[in-house]
Amino acid sequence: MIHKLHEETLSLVCDERRLTGLVIENLQKISDSQLYLELGYSTLFEYCTKGLNYSEAYAYRRIQAVNVVRILPDVKEKLKSGAINLTNLGMAQSLITSDRLSQPEKREVLAKIENCSKREAEIRIADLAKAAGVTQKEPLQKEIRFCGGDEVELTVRISRKTLDNLDKFKQRRSHVNPNMPYAQLIEFLIEKATDHRPAKPNTAPQVSKNWRYISNNLKRLVWK
């Protein structure tokens, strides 16, 4: 028997998805009618952040969804059902709004990212973008962002092979830390790479106390 609390939570999640779809619909109407200007906001983004109190990231994702919905209206139903989430839809925006893809191809992009994790969607979108010759938008954040104290946020682009190797190292260290974050893994690898072990004992040939005698080993060493 399903626990009552679980049923209630499941119902709320369904409502949350449905309401997200409705919010996107309303934002599209507000954008198309430029109602945000009448309300005293210069852009839809400003309206979302100041009028609706969304964070910048939340506002940006919803505006991306509005841009996609204009082209593929049935996206709203996919958002309501949970087949596509705002994060994956935002990553696909550059492809779907591109003039290089036909309408059927844009629908195919949506089909490719349905029910995908973020990583799966990223890989599929990157492959589709490369095949279509579409340049994806760079992330909003800079490559290096200082977070205060001694912490720095670093954004880098690496190959899939490098990512696979990092994941292999994570698995090898899973007995120490099953959920080791990439930052900690990189620190560990750097420490290993810069580990200075004690120097080996000096094996240089000894010079004879007889200063007139020069051994063959010493001659070879000097010659080298």
Image: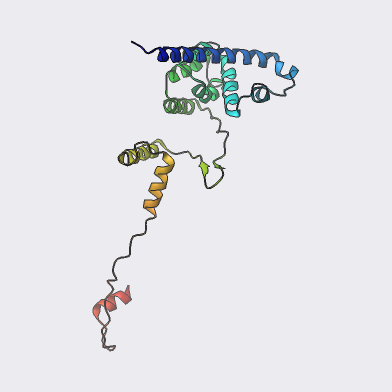
Q: How is the image coloured?
A: rainbow
Most extreme residue toward the left is 216
Q: Is residue 74 left or right of residue 182?
A: right
Q: On the picture, is 63 further left or further right than 86? A: right
Location of the C terminus (image quadrant)? bottom left
Query: Residue 204 in the image: x percent, y percent?
Result: 28, 73
Q: Compare residues 161 and 191 and report the one nearer the observer.
A: 191
Residue 15 in sight here? yes
> Residue 105: horizontal and vertical position, in percent?
49, 17
The answer to whether one can see residue 34 in this image is: no
Give the residue displayed 59% in from the left and 19% down from the top.
67
Relative height, residue 25 to residue 212 (above, below): above
| Residue found 59% across the figure and 12% down from its top | 25
- Left or right: where does residue 146 sit relative to residue 174? right
Asked which quadrant contains residue 99, the reply is top right
Instruction: Name the foreground residue: 191 vs 76.
Output: 191
Instruction: Answer above or below: position of 204 versus 21.
Output: below
Q: Residue 202 location in percent, x, y? A: 29, 71
Where the N terminus falls, by quadrant? Answer: top left
